Amino acid sequence: MTTLLAIGTGKGLFLATSTDRRDWAVSGPHFPMTGVYAVAVDKRPGRPRLLAGMTSSHFGPSVATSDDLGGSWQEPEQAPVAFPADTGASLGRVWQLTPAGPDQPDVVWAGTEPSALFRSDDGGRSFGLVRALWDHPHREQWAAGFGGQAVHSVLPHPGAPGRMAVAMSTGGVYRTADAGASWAPGNTGIRAYFLPDEWPEFGQCVHKIARDAGDPERLYAQNHHGVYRSDDDGLSWTSIAAGLPSDFGFPIVAHPSRPGTVYAFPLTADGERFPTDRRCRVYRSADAGGSWQPLTAGLPEGPFYPSVLRDAMCADDHDPAGVYFGTRSGEVYASADEGDSWSLVAAHLPDVLCVRAAEV
């Protein structure tokens, strides 16, 4: 049993492997001197396939695939993700790569900057723009967050192929029930304290959303100040921030198989993006946000200043599940026991932008 941990950084992709999730062999960088903002491990039948969304300051953004766990990579000569000429837009970067369910074995979704959704029907080798979201009348009012204006979360519904939720900064959550032919905002209950109307229909700066393992109608959201749960697939949201030391942060990760279990990494505030109390702590809820427990065993004890970005925390598909996070200062930590204890995977890497893990 081997676990693969893909680590996207500001200067390339690193791959770590382990048979016990404690001792790791790290290789890389693949795609040196590119920013790797999105990685996916596609484990549907006939694979695994790795997908990497990287951005070169010289060549621009692209998506590469590997069918031998990073031994070799394939990258099309023409940009696999590109805006049609009539949109007047150009791709800044790919922020998210999400394989669809097993009933759509060749479908992969890409969330991009500027905020758009693309669909691939050939396993991630080429993508087409989902026009209905791009043409949504709200789009001209979506604004850029501090990190850009991008679709960063793509959540297909596991029980209904036509349903999906996406989230963007800024803009909020949008939902479709007809395979992307139409979209509606789903932000009721999410606060946007920075707007004159703090409870708008759209315009929230949602940082990340995740879907519960046991109840596909239950979603979790880390907002720009606010942690929320939805029990109706994103139609409405309620706060679950009580018990956390702060409601600001970037990642939110649902346990892959345990219903009601979710992880967060709180930061002090939007104007003070350090871990709360300058301590390295992952918080876990086992009751869908009703209460929270700090997890610190094996993590640095002294003052700790690096932040964890929205895609720099993930869980694997083992039982018990592994949980992982990487920091802006290049450390990567792993837990083989669902967060109860932690060990260091790697240090002194470039700034960690995203992590993805799976049994391969």
Image: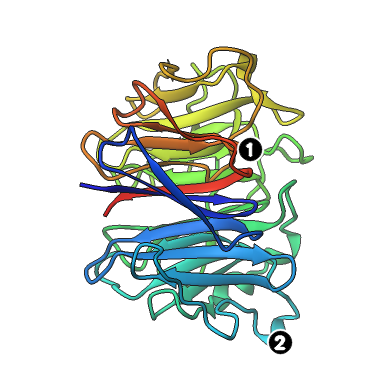
Q: Amino acid at mark 2?
A: Asp
Q: Determine whether, in the image, residue 31 is placed left or right of residue 285.
A: right
Figure check: 132 above or below 95: below
Q: Which image quadrant is residue 161 in? A: bottom left
Residue at the (55%, 79%) spot, across then down: 80
Instruction: Classify mark 1: residues with Cα within 10 Å, few (<14), some (14-19) or many (20+).
Output: some
Between 345 and 246, the residue placed more toward the observer is 345
Residue at the (63%, 43%) spot, across then down: 351
Q: How many marks?
A: 2
Residue at the (34%, 21%) spot, across then down: 340
SS class, disc 2: helix
The reply to whether residue 146 is in sight is yes
Q: Determine whether, in the image, residue 113 is placed left or right of residue 40.
A: right
The reply to whether residue 174 is in sight is no
Q: Which image quadrant is residue 55 in? A: bottom right
Q: Amino acid at mark 1?
A: Arg
| Residue at image mark 1 | 328
Between 3 and 29, the residue placed more toward the observer is 29
Image coordinates for residue 15, horizontal then vertical, percent: 44, 52
Figure check: 194 above or below 2: above
Figure check: 263 above or below 49: above
Q: Nearer the viewer, mark 1 or mark 2?
A: 1
The dot on residue 86 is 2
Figure check: 13 above or below 131: above
